[in-house]
Each structure stands twice: as structure tokens, then as C-alpha cells.
């Protein structure tokens, strides 16, 4: 009887032992599967965000189709964009349909390369950088506000497909400057219209404003003053100029180096008009020179006849 009982207990232990090993094996397989999936996800994320360089440390350029565009991007590779200092730069990146890839922007020409954005969120603590995205257009443009000279360089728009693919955008930074036609000095007659034309050179966007100053005082809204502005030009007009309007005028556009001109409003008399005085002086010199030549010729003829 004891032997039978012991045999039954041993049999039961064998069953429980087998059940334990089966359950343990299933748990291990499930855990291994989860760990494997996590490792695969981490590996994909790493491939998506790390920089890709060849053995010669040369940036790998994505393959481009015969049409000049990659199969992932609608934006052409090696696109060049210009922006002015203090302005806003927009680097284009239009992505064709992709599954679950993540779009990232990376600054490539710095050491080490710097991740700027991942998806729609910034990755660095600089609020000048942001992504402008419209889902129906599939654009993932990188916007840089208050552009600095140091922002010029090479940027990468990367999509975490398998394998990851990229295009590269070059940002060129210019310095806009103003120029007033007729500078440095302009003479106008009293009672006439003073018209100053200010051209904005090397600008990449329409200035938010153009302030005009007369001897350090802004005059945009003064009576008799009219200021017009377009993308690259501002014109100041002042009716019935008089001597009080003489002085230094400044054209000061937003995000551009200002320009200056000295205006001289003169009474309408010939003696006060430098141009007229110069013309009269030149006429007098010419007449005297002509009379001298006639006199010399006459003396020469007289001497020849007497000889």
C-alpha cells in the first residue's frame, strides 16, 4: 500500500514538473519575443536618427531616380535656399507617401552632426527651429527664425524608411542693405517735391517696415510726407520742400543695413545753385579761352604780313 502511494506521489510530481517546464518555456519564448521586438524597434530608431557615413567618412547621398528625384522625396536633392540675416528661412522637404517612417532634420556640416527636429517636435533647445507640416501636402519644411550668419550650411531631411534615406538642402545667408539713389548729396530747389528712392539690395523677403528719419526723427507719418513700399524699394515724397527740410535723411528697412543722404534745399536763385554756378563759371572760362585764342591768331597773322 505504501509503495503504491509513493508511486502515485512520484507520478504526480513528474506531471507538475513537466507542466512547470512547459509553462516556463512558454514564458521564456514570450519574453524573448518581446525583447526581440524591442531590439528591432531600437535598431530601427537608431538607424533612423544616427548619421550615415561611409568608411571614407563621406556623407552617403541617397539614390536618385532618372527623373532627378528620389523615390521617397518630391523635393529635389541638393536644393539651395537663400535667407537674409534677421529674416526667416524655410528649407523645403516634401515627402511622398511612406508607411510609419519618421522625418528628422539634421545639421550636417558641424561636428558632431546635430539633430534639430524629430517628427513635429524640436530636438534641441533653440526655439528658432521648428517644422512646418501640412498633412495633405506632405511637406516637412524646416523653418529657421531670426537667421544668423552661423546658420549657413548643409542640412539633411531624413526619413526612417528601411534603409533610411535623405536629401540635403544648402542654406545661404545674405546681408540685406539699403541704398538711396543720389547719395551722398542731393540738391533740390525750394518749392519743388523732394523725392527719395531707397532700394533694398540682397533681400530675400519683403521688409516688415521701412522707417525714414530726418536728422534722427522718424517722419513716416508727418504732414505732407508720403511713404510707399514694395518688396525691394521704398519711396519718400515731400511736397513743397523748403530750407527747413535740409539735412540728413535715413532709410532704415527691417533686417537691413540703413542708408543715408544729405539733402540741400536751396532758394531758387542762380547764385545759390551750385550746378548753375558751375555752369556759369564754365561758360566764362570757355569764353575767355576763346577770346585768347582769337587774339593769338590775330597777332600771328599781323606779324606774318609785316614780315
Image (spheres, rainbow, N blue to C red):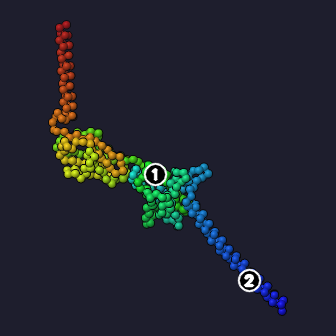
Q: Position of residue 161 (x, y in %)?
A: 55, 63
Give the spatial CA distance, label 2 vs label 1: 69 Å
Q: Earlier in the sequence, mark 2 or mark 1?
A: 2
Q: With respect to residue 194, does 303 lie above or below?
A: above
Residue 130 visible in image: yes
Q: With respect to residue 261, does 124 lie above or below?
A: below
Q: Quadrant of the C terminus?
A: top left
**Few, some or many C-alpha atoms within 10 Å of disc 2 (few <14, some 14-19, many ≥20)?**
few
**Few, some or many C-alpha atoms within 10 Å of disc 1 (few <14, some 14-19, many ≥20)?**
some
Residue under numbered circle 2: 16
Residue 78 visible in image: no
**Residue drawn 46% across the image and 51% down it:** 151
Disc marking residue 151:
1
- The mark total stands at 2
Helix, strand or loop under label 1: helix
**Residue drawn 47% across the image and 55% down it:** 76
Q: Position of residue 126 (x, y in %)?
A: 46, 57
Q: Quadrant of the N terminus?
A: bottom right
Residue nearest the observer in this picture, 122 or 166: 122
Quadrant of res 264: top left
Does residue 187 appear to the left or right of 54 in the view shown? left
**Residue drawn 25% across the image and 50% down it:** 219
Amino acid at each position: 500500500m505504501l509503495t503504491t502511494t509513493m508511486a502515485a506521489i512520484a507520478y504526480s510530481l513528474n506531471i507538475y514538473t513537466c507542466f512547470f517546464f512547459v509553462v516556463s518555456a512558454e514564458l521564456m519564448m514570450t519574453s524573448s519575443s518581446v525583447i526581440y521586438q524591442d531590439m528591432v524597434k531600437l535598431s530601427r530608431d537608431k538607424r533612423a536618427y544616427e548619421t550615415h557615413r561611409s568608411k571614407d567618412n563621406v556623407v552617403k547621398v541617397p539614390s536618385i531616380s532618372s527623373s532627378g528625384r528620389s523615390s521617397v522625396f518630391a523635393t529635389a536633392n541638393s536644393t539651395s535656399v537663400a535667407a537674409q540675416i534677421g529674416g526667416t528661412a524655410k528649407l523645403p522637404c516634401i515627402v511622398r507617401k511612406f508607411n510609419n517612417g519618421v522625418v528628422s532634420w539634421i545639421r550636417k556640416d558641424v561636428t558632431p552632426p546635430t539633430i534639430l527636429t524629430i517628427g513635429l517636435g524640436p530636438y534641441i533647445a533653440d526655439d528658432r527651429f521648428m517644422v512646418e507640416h501640412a498633412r495633405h501636402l506632405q511637406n516637412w519644411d524646416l523653418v529657421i527664425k531670426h537667421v544668423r550668419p552661423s546658420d549657413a550650411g548643409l542640412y539633411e531631411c531624413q526619413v526612417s524608411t528601411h534603409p533610411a534615406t535623405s536629401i540635403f538642402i544648402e542654406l545661404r545667408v545674405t546681408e540685406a542693405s539699403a541704398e538711396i539713389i543720389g547719395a551722398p548729396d542731393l540738391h533740390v530747389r525750394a518749392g519743388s517735391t523732394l523725392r527719395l528712392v531707397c532700394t533694398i539690395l540682397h533681400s530675400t523677403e519683403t521688409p516688415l517696415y521701412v522707417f525714414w528719419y530726418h536728422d534722427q526723427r522718424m517722419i513716416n507719418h508727418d504732414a505732407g510726407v508720403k511713404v510707399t513700399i514694395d518688396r525691394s524699394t521704398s519711396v519718400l515724397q515731400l511736397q513743397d520742400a523748403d530750407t527747413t527740410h535740409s539735412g540728413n535723411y535715413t532709410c532704415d528697412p527691417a533686417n537691413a543695413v540703413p542708408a543715408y543722404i544729405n539733402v540741400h534745399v536751396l532758394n531758387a536763385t542762380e547764385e545759390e545753385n551750385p550746378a548753375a554756378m558751375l555752369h556759369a563759371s564754365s561758360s566764362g572760362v570757355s569764353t575767355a579761352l576763346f577770346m585768347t585764342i582769337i587774339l593769338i591768331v590775330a597777332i600771328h597773322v599781323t606779324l606774318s604780313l609785316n614780315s
